[in-house]
Every structure is written in C-alpha cells, then in structure tokens.
Image (spheres, rainbow, N blue to C red):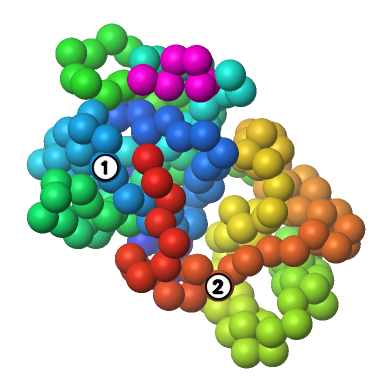
Amino acid sequence: MMSDLWKDPLEDFSGKMPIFPLPNVVFFPHTFLPLHIFEERYRAMVADATNGEKLICMALLKPGYEDDYEGSPPIHTVGTVGFMPMKKDHADGTSDILLVGMDKVKIKEITSDTPYRMAEVEILHDVVGESDPEALQEKIFQQFNVLNDDNLLSAATQFFSEGLDFEMAVNLVISHLEIEGEEKQKLLELGDLSLRAKVLLQYLESGLRVDLAADFGIGFAGDLRMN
C-alpha cells in the first residue's frame, strides 16, 4: 500500500531526535520539504542524522524568535518528524536535503551537548470524524481547480490526487496555502482530519490560492527553504 511508505522509518526509532526550528515553516505529515542547510549547527545536525536514524523533527518558532534566534527561542510543541532520504553536499560545506513527512508529534525538548536542539517526541494520531472523507477530498480538489487557471497543472493535480489518501491530500494542499505560519500551525494541531479539511475548504472557497507546483518536481531544482 502507498501509505506503508510513510511508516517504516519510525517502526523502531529511538524516540529522540534533533529539532530543526524555523520561522514560518510548518511541516505536515505525508508531504515533502526541501531545505538548504548552511548554518554550522545545522550542518552538524544533518551530518549526525545522516549517520543515525535520518530523522529530524521540524518545529515552528514562536513570534519574537528574532531576539534569541542564535540561542533557543520558544517553539510550538507540536511538530512533524521528517525522514531524510536525500542529501546533496556542496563544495562550500552547505547541503540540500529532502524531508519526507512521517508523523505529527508532541515535542519535549531535552538537554544535549550537541550544537543543535534535541527532543523526545511522542507520536500523535489524528482521527477522521467525517463519514465520507472521499467526498470531502473531492470537493477540495474541485475547488483548487476552480481557483487555478493553469489547465496543465489542474490536470496534473487531478491525476496526482487519485493516488493520495485523505490525509495526504488534505495535508498537501494545506502545506501550500498562502497563509501565515501561525495559522498553518493551528491546522496542524487539529486532531480531527475532517475538521482540518473543512477549514481548508473554507480557505479555498474564500478565494485563497494554493501553489502545488513544487510537489510535482520533487528534488532540488526548485525553491528551497533556507535555514
């Protein structure tokens, strides 16, 4: 099954992993996140993850992080574990990585002698309260196509959506909504996928655009989030 691809890396994981806190970046399960790594502490993080479980927990920095960005500014304590299947190193010591969203987790930061932050994480399981999630999923992609005037992309989206389960489809579209990180964080923290989908549909019906193009060319060619 397609959904099985997202479970194996967490089957026997230690429960501890690096935290990668970023501003305005909210990572959702079953989505993809390309990142450009250049800060020394995060170069060390990626090197250690590469030699370890290849797992990194993405977390959103809370407002006001600028005053202590080089230290340990407050983060939201619900994030997403990413599995790192791809890494491209550059001659200047920087690298590009791709994270695959695994599961939503509760983050409990722990003390560490590493230059980057560490946490114990607890997997959080969402529920599907909707009796007909397939119909709700179809409404979401129909509304996306109404808003998108690129016929080729709309056709590709429809083709792509047929291979996605409910959670993947909802999270993929939400991750590309043009809204603030704090608003996306609220959606991530919702424990009912159906409610998350209904809020998403309200955003789409309000005319808010979504840019899904990046996920039709997974790799390092497009825009990369900068650490």
Residue placed at 80% from the left, 73% from the top? Answer: 147
**Considering only vertical position in the picture, is 92 above or below 180?**
below
Residue farthest to the right? 206
Q: Is residue 77 visible?
A: no
* Amino acid type shown at disc 1: Phe
**Considering only vertical position in the picture, is 178 above or below 136?**
above
The disc placed on residue 213 is: 2
Residue 103 position within the rendered picture, expressed as x and y whole percent measured from the top left? 45, 43
Q: State the image quarter where residue 72 is shown.
A: top left
The disc placed on residue 155 is: none
The verdict on residue 67 being magenta is yes
Residue denoted by label 1: 38
Q: Is residue 173 left or right of residue 227?
A: right
Question: Mark 2 to mark 1: distance in Å?
Answer: 25 Å
- Image quarter (top left, top right, bottom left or bottom right) of the N terminus: bottom left
Identify the element where label 2 is drawn.
helix
Q: Earlier in the sequence, mark 2 or mark 1?
A: 1
Q: Is residue 41 left or right of residue 163?
A: left
Identify the element where label 1 is drawn.
loop
The verdict on residue 76 being magenta is no
* Amino acid type shown at disc 2: Ala
Residue 82 position within the rendered picture, expressed as x and y whole percent measured from the top left? 37, 45
Residue placed at 44% from the left, 15% from the top? Answer: 68
Residue placed at 19% from the left, 59% from the top? Answer: 88
Disc 2 + disc 1, Cβ < 8 Å: no
Q: State the image quarter where residue 10 is shown.
A: top left
Which residues are the magenta region? 65-70
- Viewer-side residue, 144 vs 92: 92
Q: Is residue 200 left or right of residue 205?
A: left
Q: Is residue 204 visible?
A: yes
